[in-house]
Amino acid sequence: MGVMRKVLHAIAAGALAMALPLSASAQGLIRDAEIEQILRDYSNPLFAAAGLKPDDVNIYIIQDDSLNAFVAAGQNVFLHTGLIMEAKTPEELKGVIAHETGHIAGGHSVTREAAVGAASGTSLVTMGLGVLALFAGAPDAALALFGSAPQFGLMTIFKFTRAEESSADQYGLDFMEKTGQSADGLVSFMEHFRYEELMSESRRDPYFRSHPISSDRIAALTRRARDVSAKAQPQTPEAIQQLAMMKAKLVGFIGPAGRVMSRYPDTDQSIPAKYARAIAAYRAVDIKKALTLIDELITVQPENAYFYELKGQILFESGRSLESVGPHRRSVELAPKQALLKVNLARSLIGTKDDAAVLEAEGMLQDALQLEPDNAFAWNQLAVAYAKQGRIGDADLATAEEAYQLGDMSRAYNFARRAKDKLTLQTPNGQRADDIMALSDPRNRRGGARRGFGMAIHTEH
């Protein structure tokens, strides 16, 4: 995640310490276990077809209504929510991902122009379980930040040459062919937005400013796509439903209320429509309606981890921590490899203020950090769990870890120093505190780099 760390250091000083509603105009990274899993289901076969190790390719979701996707700093793929929302079929979204994978596979040199907003205008966003608030840099605040979200204000325009674009097209077609999928989606995506060529540079969507389209390029793409599509299998009902669920979730969480009702009126009794309306009701603090709708969905799909996740979130955010534990626990049982779901459960357990529950939360957070060592909010909650057990040295160290992951090196140094004073240096945690101090020491810093350094999970008592 090197690219995120570089950007993060540039904006750390502008971290917001107050809750803000997530709006359609806000920009930043969002985390959501369900959407991330669907994008993995779509992308991993394409990464493998490109000869890449899927686990080595990072996928980031940027909350931005504009149409855009790009790769940066090696094997990092960024997708705007606007792209997901505009994709009419799974093939369109997969086609764009295949094209971006082509840039990675082709080793194309990318010139990055990143515009990071002023500190006061930077939006730091995480969805996590669909939390519609953001906090950063305020350990004493009632954090509603879910998942780690190395944050940034704005990343835009990647200037590729036309030759590289055509090359990435052909790579993308290769990957769609190898995975037995139609290439019609990539063609229709390009054709649909072909009119962008006629617009001024300032009016074009970011994707077409950075990925210039030409008639020759579309013609070459179309010719090859016919052969690829002729041998392809149709998209599965599951893939089609997954796209519908992503759209419903995004509309529900980041779209204006009016958009939910216009796209998903009460007459629409489909699962995605009920999902969007349940989320919209939650956002409108109509808890009774939200719970009724989510319970209806759970009845239809009792093995869907993300429906339980949403129910747990609704209950927790309504001040019903004890009731939220059950749904969150069920979500973890159904999707045990999802770190964000484990953090959700841990937060609910801590909220019960029961000693045994807090101890369980500690173990759950350690599990989550084994899966995602750079999950800043997991470190934050681990600090809370330690503090509630009176383990102040460990709590200070976990807070230092949180600050370190957020790029706040001054805070990381101060809390690591406090932890070191309370811990035995010869123990793993004592050594970790010393290491963080060395890396974050203002006298030794060289651009805030954080490399070659394993994350310790704090287990000692």
Image (cartoon, rainbow, N blue to C red):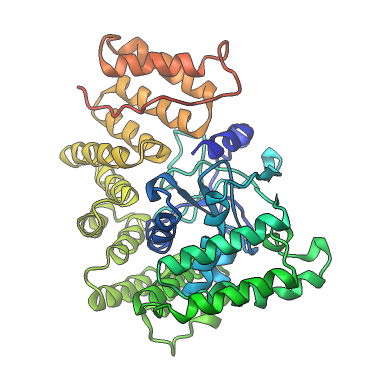
Residue nearest the observer in this picture, 97 or 125: 97
Residue sitting farthest toward the right: 200
Where is residue 316? Give x, y as percent. 33, 55
Residue nearest the observer in this picture, 442 or 61: 61
Question: Please, is residue 454 above or below residue 204 in the view?
Answer: above
Where is residue 324? Give x, y as percent. 27, 56
| Residue 62 in sight here | no
Residue sitting farthest toward the bottom: 267
Residue sitting farthest toward the left: 356
Residue found 48% across the figure and 81% down from its top: 264
Question: Please, is residue 185 above or below residue 70 in the view?
Answer: below
Left or right of 12 on screen, residue 393: left
Where is residue 113? Give x, y as percent. 71, 44
Where is residue 429? Give x, y as percent. 30, 19
Residue found 31% across the figure and 67% down from its top: 307
| Residue 45 in sight here | yes
Question: Please, is residue 30 above or below residue 170 in the view?
Answer: above
Numbered circles on residues, count: 0
Left or right of 368 on screen, residue 111: right
Screen quadrant of the C terminus: top left
